[in-house]
Amino acid sequence: MLKSLRRNFSAALLTLVSLTCSAEPVDEAGYVTIGGIRQWVTIEGQDSANPVVLIVHGGPGNPNTPFAHKLFGNWSKDFTVVQWDQRGSGKTYAASKPAEGEVLTMERLSQDGNEVARYAMRRLGKRKLILMGGSWGSALAVNMAMAAPELFDAYVGTAQLVNYQADMAASYRKTLALAKAADDAEPLAKLEKLGPPPWTDPRAFGVLRRITRKYEALRSDAPPKGWFAFGPGYDTPDYEAAYEAGEDYSFLNFVGLAGDGMGPKIDLRKLGVRFSMPVYMLQGEEDLVTPPEISRAYFDELVAPKKEFIPLQRTGHDPNRSMIDAQFAVLLRLR
């Protein structure tokens, strides 16, 4: 009985806070103690009574915060957008540099992400959030959703990373076929020297990624010019240096010195395939990093209250206008 009264009181308090925050804009950017360290968190929306979207950035090591206004600025009318620079990335890296020998783990980053979600819920008087992740961030977001499903109203994944080994094998196979079809000597030589995964050379992923970008660019629409230029407050030499250092640190933790980093261990099926929330998966048809057939096979196995797979034409792995617009369209359906 006492527990029930406490739950009812907590629910009523959250509702009251939400009502008192109605129609109040929020625009915050600063450090919050998450996982015992200072982590950079931003919250932006024109009406704090709106639904909240927690965006989990990719990379790892590539925060969206430096160019968030270009990508998500028009979302603030309908949503409150929460982002954070993950441990080892961007402004979090600058303020909380990892100790020598400190490694990143999916478990630690997942715990951080859910702590950010709880912080945002307290700050905004919400009982749940919409969770959105892309690329590396999609794998991290699924780990978050499975660890604490009670926090989230829905999961929206883009360029879904499902199983690193399967994704990389398909990526290598498809990219090699494109190089052969084009009789493209230089990429072909690099790919043949690299050989198919699994890899133990930490440079291998980068070699393949640079070639996939070339072929994706030929088959997809480019993002608007200037989208990925650092915005005000981020366009300083000190921040650029921290961003690059965090990117290097995070990427090395992702691939590992001998193919033993966070990435090669990713296999989302090990977490189970049953979601307690609706799942929306958006997938570029020209994506050569997380190929559509791998994402689709995983999606088809998922059990969720509602699920939808949305293919995106003329879209590769990286964000372009079609991807951002499709994400926003899905979010509007969740309002």
Image (cartoon, helix red, strand yellow):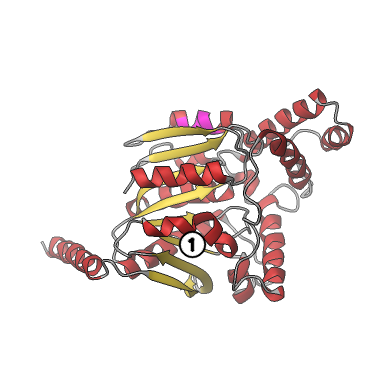
Q: Position of residue 66 (x, y in %)?
A: 59, 64
As for residue 8 lying within the magenta part, the answer is no
Q: Is residue 90 left or right of residue 81?
A: right
Q: Which residue is mark 1?
A: 83
Neighbourhood count class around disc 1 (C-alpha, 10 Å): few under 14, some 14–19, many 20 upward: many
Front-most of residues 174 and 105: 174
State the extent of the magenta-drawn residues as a range: 295-299
Q: Is residue 99 above or below residue 301?
A: below
Q: Is residue 194 left or right of residue 38?
A: right
Q: Position of residue 129 (x, y in %)?
A: 36, 55
Front-most of residues 292 and 169: 292
- Residue appearing at x 72%, y 29% in the figure: 173
Q: Residue furthest front?
A: 225
Front-most of residues 192 and 40: 40
Q: Is residue 104 above or below residue 202?
A: below
| Quadrant, the N terminus | bottom left
Examine the rendering and report whether any part of residue 59 can be seen: yes
Q: Position of residue 309 (x, y in %)?
A: 45, 33
Q: Position of residue 63 (x, y in %)?
A: 59, 60
Q: The disc labelled 1 sits on which kind of residue?
A: Gln
Q: Is residue 304 above or below residue 204?
A: above
Q: Main secondary structure of the magenta part?
A: helix
- Residue appearing at x 35%, y 69% in the figure: 25
